[in-house]
Image: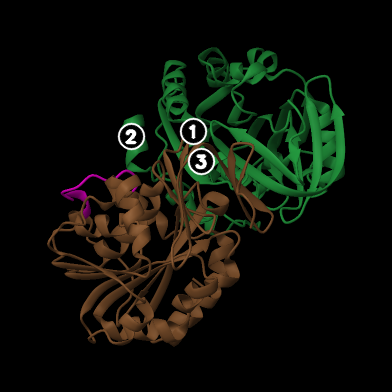
Chain colours: A brown, B green
Amino acid sequence: MGNPVIDGWFLERDRGYGLALEVKEHLHGEQSPWQKIDVYATASFGNLLTLDDIVMLTSRDNFLYHEMMSHPALFTHAAPEVAVVVGGGDCGTLREVLRHPTIRRAVQVELDERVTRVCEQYFPELTEANGDPRAELLFEDAIAWMARCEPETADVVILDTTDPVGQARRLFGEPFYRDVHRALGEGGIMVAQSESALLDVALLEELHRNMKAAGFTDVRTIQFPQPTYPTGWWTATLARKGARIEGFREEAVRNRPFRTRYYNQETHRAAFALPEFLREALGA
Amino acid sequence: MGNPVIDGWFLERDRGYGLALEVKEHLHGEQSPWQKIDVYATASFGNLLTLDDIVMLTSRDNFLYHEMMSHPALFTHAAPEVAVVVGGGDCGTLREVLRHPTIRRAVQVELDERVTRVCEQYFPELTEANGDPRAELLFEDAIAWMARCEPETADVVILDTTDPVGQARRLFGEPFYRDVHRALGEGGIMVAQSESALLDVALLEELHRNMKAAGFTDVRTIQFPQPTYPTGWWTATLARKGARIEGFREEAVRNRPFRTRYYNQETHRAAFALPEFLREALGA
């Protein structure tokens, strides 16, 4: 793949679009059993984590993704008690989940323990909740874990995965969604990171089809900014078992016992507003 | 400044953040009296216009910016008849303005005629409305034009400017805003492109102060995605004379006699939803 740092800039290229971050120092590099893991100190985005030379997160803007992968689903559910995070080895999503006082168990199923260990060192703010007694960190294959998960035991399942290539492709398929559907209780919500709103319309259409085919009653895509992912315009797709995705616990959002930097009642509602071209593509 | 194209990629760098587009061909290059103008054919974003090596627009994603610079303001105003576009030499904003049947006069005041001529050649879809009898294309300094503009003659003034550096800095200052305020009728709306939501919070705070100091009754910032501007997350700031910015002509939006690709009732409302950190910064 060559060195992703050219002239002091980390460059990620994706279908003719590139994203660059000025790098001051290569803080860490290793090849885990699963992937190449690197951490850089950037000039203005704090630390940068990459997997196989793809940007996973920066200190500066990961709050957008982590808040939007967790709070819209958790505040839509009436009383989420058990949450499962698939992937999410940086633990930023897990931290947001644990902020919810209704949660009594949060399981994270990440394949690569090294990602979590590296983040403990370079992104301690993301892993700060890992010692919470409600948290359970498992390092194993999420496909196998979900297949044997006790039915109707989860309220929210968050698919905080890498891009749908290689190994991770299976985490975007109907068979896996079926297992998630079975693991969820009635009214339970699955939320999957679903790539760029501009570049990945075909993928979004496929995910909607797969989720409906897997038995979900309602499927809705939300959008939010994420400057260090391709196009800076990201989506997550929510699918609900046995109920529509509409309304949310506004009073609980207003009185939330934790700080957010992006998420609030207005951005919750705004996230569901789809551009015309996506409304047309997704039949929303 | 050196060649902005490295290894076949056009690279724009801004405060540690970089944006790259794969380039197939350099279609046009010239030094006008005001700036360096270039057009490239990109691999996946259509044609790319740059001024002094800064991305102005691409064929693929300019609809986001142009729709959001025009429709929210025009549908908030009760019956906009006269609109002024400051800058906007690519004519994409002018085209959106002219889609509104209430408009009977649309004046564009652009400093550099060459930008418009180059766009006529390489972005004909943006300049297609220039022959509309309601359109008036002026090529002169907007500061001087606005200073002598007849008071209370405009309903909407759109500041479709380059970044606030060099010459363009004056277009973000209180004296110019005062002239715009005088040119607007009661209830009139000024809308200014106001840079990145993530990188330019200090500028946004300054613009709010300047606009209020210039006499505007209400100032509100909207946000929208714009993948080929730094961070992919852009803002525009609306300021209204003698009235609050609230509500909009929803029925007219629903029955609009033209197609949009981003803008609709939901994205109109969503654009006004500010993240927590911006709400705090702007006191909204």
Residue identified by numbered label 1: A43
Residue identified by numbered label 2: B284
Residue A78 in view (yes/no): yes
Location of residue B224 in the rendering, given as x and y in whole percent from the top left corner: 51, 46
Nearer to us of marks 1 and 3 is 1
Looking at the image, residue A91 lies above or below residue A151 = above
Nearer to us of marks 1 and 2 is 1
Residue A282 in view (yes/no): no
Image quadrant holding the N terminus of chain A, namely bottom right
Identify the subunit bearing mark 3: B
- Circles 1 and 3: CB distance less than 8 Å? no
Nearer to us of marks 2 and 3 is 2
Question: Would you say B119 lies left or right of A116 here?
Answer: right
The overriding secondary structure of the stretch rendered in magenta is loop
Q: Are marks 2 and 3 on the same chain?
A: yes
Element carrying mark 3: loop
Identify the residue shown where x is 49% and y is 74%.
A167
